[in-house]
Image (tube, rainbow, N blue to C red):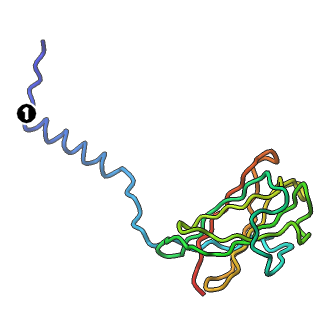
Amino acid sequence: MTQTIITRRTALITGAAAAACAAALPVPARAQGVAPTPTMRGGANNYLPGAPIVERIGGGGFLMTGTVRRAGDGAPLSGARIQIWAHTTEGHERDPHSHGATLTDATGAFRLEMPQIVPAFGQPHGHLAYDSGGYKTVFLRPVMSSARDKTLAAHFVLEPV
């Protein structure tokens, strides 16, 4: 059995190497606040102001989900009105019956069932808007990874007006 003897010199060299390795590790950035979500290009296409709050758009079968938080501290916003519309198996995104709105719950989450989204202009995508005042209007246009997806999520971080 071999015995390792640690001398002062070995301890100093080992300690210096450990300190150098630790210095090379990335340091997490300090929180500077949660940045607001910018409006997406094409997000406002076929927007209909004042779409009604609904339990479901059409026959359902597809689920749109997401969250709404406040810029800066990231606090969830309850009661935020989110309008959703898309080109679906039941209508075009310009059709009033393809639009509906929902409100966020106490955790800032929302969900709305709607017909299956189908590709428009080659991409399956949805449209969402926060447009109810108190915060700047934001339009989102998230694209699905596949036309076979049954859910799509979008997340808003809103900046006070």
Above or below — where is 63 with respect to 161?
Answer: above
Q: Work out which quarter of the rendered image holds the N terminus and state it.
A: top left
Check the image and report above or below for 159 versus 104: below
Question: Residue at the location (66% across, 85% down)?
Answer: 133
Residue at image position (70%, 72%) is 82
- Location of residue 97 (image quadrant): bottom right
Residue 142 rendering spot, x and y as whole percentages: 73, 61
Position of 55 compared to 88: left or right?
A: left
Residue 79: give x, y in percent of width and height: 60, 75
Q: Label 1 belongs to which residue? A: 7
**Splitting the image into 4 quarters, where does residue 28 fall?**
bottom left
- Report the side of 79 relative to 20 (left or right): right
User: Which quadrant would the C terminus be assigned to in this image?
Assistant: bottom right
Q: Residue extending furthest top?
A: 1
Q: Position of residue 124 (x, y in %)?
A: 83, 54
Q: Which kind of residue does numbered mark 1 sit on?
A: Thr
Across and down, in percent, residue 112 comes to 72, 61
Residue at the image position 39 percent from the left and 66 percent from the top? 30
Query: In the depicted view, which residue is nearer to us: 157 or 35?
Result: 157
SS under mark 1:
loop
Tell whether 68 sits left or right of 18: right
Residue shown at the point (61%, 86%) measured from the top left: 134
